[in-house]
Amino acid sequence: MFWLQMNGPVYTYNMRRHLIDRVEGGKAFLNENELHHLTRVLRAREGDLFEGLDSRGNRYRCDLRRGSGGWYGKILDSVTGSCESPVRITLAQALIKKSKFEWVVQKAVELGVVEIVPVQTERTEVRLNQQREDRKMQRWQRILEEAVKQSGRSVLPAVGAPVLLDELLNRDSNSICLVMDEEGGTDLKGLRKRLAGLNSFTVLVGPEGGWGARDRELFSVHSAISVNLGPRILRTETASVVALSLLQYEFGDLGGSCPG
């Protein structure tokens, strides 16, 4: 970490980012896990600076302090600017093997999604009972939070419980549903004019076995748009990253600069 004094407050590069639970009286309070990581793992000391992120997109430059009630961050000022994309993308990813799905969660957050929805399709091989689902969701949430801090985002995306494909397609949403389809569909270049002016998309990526006949019937009923990502067959986790990258490049901020 580099420190720079410019006749006033101290500014930092690569300032540590931590999630805060609440702000009261000019103080930022971290949850137990974040506080343990900051003070025990990173061995931060009183007076060290960090950036606090709340769940509403606010960012604060904080000075670590210790009072009678424990550790907190004294808010020095608000951090302006945002790395949030102007386009709202929900990634609906069919459940896949543990390590692959976790990798998709991490990369989707880095690529600016606002929501990740695990989906059970006709050919989904991974099935979760309630106990496994609860553990998985806790794990996904931790990965998501770390990716938010690493990537410099200010808003925490949502990660939902697994849903059936028809439940996803029946959701009341203003998003255009784009289905990544290895068997056909329109390429994104061809859809550029058709989608111009839109800023909300749901990207639906299937399981390793591809879409089943029942899945395709549902797509037809709900007027989902099939999208082809090129002549090569991509693994499901690769398709997710490629689709998100292309949408952010065409309609979002990928390739631009972050004002924060």
Image (spheres, rainbow, N blue to C red):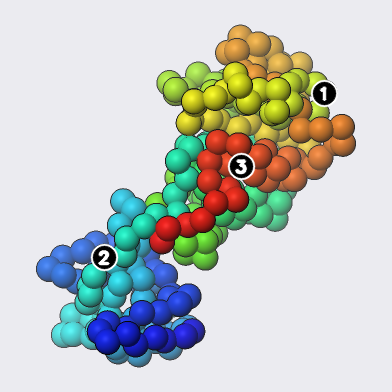
Q: Which residue is mark 1?
A: 183
- Mark 2 vs mark 1: give the one in front: 2
Question: Image check: 175 left or right of 204?
Answer: left
Please name the amino acid that badge 2 sits on: Ser
Image mark for residue 249: 3
Q: CA distance from mark 3 to mark 1?
A: 24 Å
Q: Residues within 10 Å of mark 1 (few under 14, many from 20)?
A: few
Image mark for residue 13: none
Q: Residues within 10 Å of mark 3 (few under 14, many from 20)?
A: few
Question: Image check: 230 left or right of 163?
Answer: right
Q: Which residue is mark 2?
A: 78
SS type, badge 3: helix
User: Looking at the figure, which quarter contains the C terminus?
Assistant: bottom left
Question: Image check: 65 left or right of 159?
Answer: left
Is residue 145 in view from this perspective? Answer: no
SS type, badge 1: loop
At x 66% / y 54%, what residue is drawn?
103
Residue 213, percent across and down? 76, 16
At x 21% / y 64%, what residue is drawn?
23
At x 54% / y 24%, what residue is drawn?
196
Whether 55 is drawn above or below 7: the answer is above
Residue 58, percent across and down? 30, 57
Q: Are marks 2 and 3 in contact (CB under 8 Å)?
A: no
